[in-house]
Image (tube, helix red, strand yellow):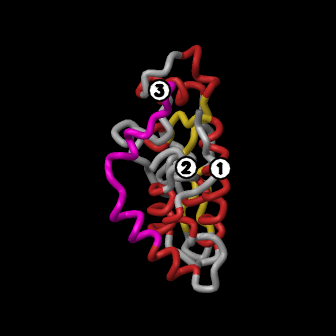
Amino acid sequence: ACQTSSVQKTNATVASSTSASASVSASASASNSSSTNSEQLCITEEGMRLMPDLSATPGKLCTANDLDFDGTKYVAKVPMCRGNVTDKMKLTVAKSYNIKESDVSKFTFDHYVPLTLGGANDVSNIWPAPKEVSSAKKVYVDDVAAQLRDGKISQEDAVRLVKAWKPSDCK
């Protein structure tokens, strides 16, 4: 079974802190140095992937050239894209993860680099997340996005932190 109620201790310092920028930088460095291909191997006993396959979903940032570009936001003027994961996109992503069309509804098609951090609405940034993983990650992403919005961290650090996040089942 997948238990995703807690966030790795390495990333926990992102939550409220008067020296949030320093905390996030330290967390980002620690997370980045410990980040390996093991993210691709985080699979439940039932064979469900808890992290994106980085060869299928490397992540992508929004740019002003994207069809879904919706302007810039935050202090850092981060390019933002509208989210519109179509059924065609879901099927394309599902196929790259060897998921049968009949099983697509079991997943949330999640943006690896979240839209709130300037992620693109593109198949290279979408992965089939188990619904409980997507819910657990959202709480963390919201905290990181608030720090980006408030100018406490850079987009680069925000993306690094979110990419380093793992469900509690992934050690």
Residue at point 55%, 49% (across, down)? 168
Residue at point 63%, 70% (across, down)? 15
Disc sitting over residue 33 in the figure:
none
Residue 102 at what x, y percent from top left? 58, 14
Labels 1 & 2 near each other (Cβ < 8 A): yes
> Which residue is tagged 2?
168
Decide which of tag 1 and tag 2 comes sooner along the chain.
1
Q: Amino acid at mark 1?
A: Ser
**In the rendered structure, which segment of residues is drawn in magenta?**
27-46
Q: Residue 44 magenta-drawn?
A: yes
Q: Is residue 48 above or below residue 118?
A: above
- Mark 2: few/some/many CA within 10 Å (<14, 14-19, 20+): some
Q: Is residue 114 above or below residue 87?
A: below
> Which residue is tagged 3?
47
Q: CA distance from mark 2 to mark 3?
A: 17 Å
Disc sitting over residue 5 in the figure:
1
Q: Amino acid at mark 3?
A: Gly
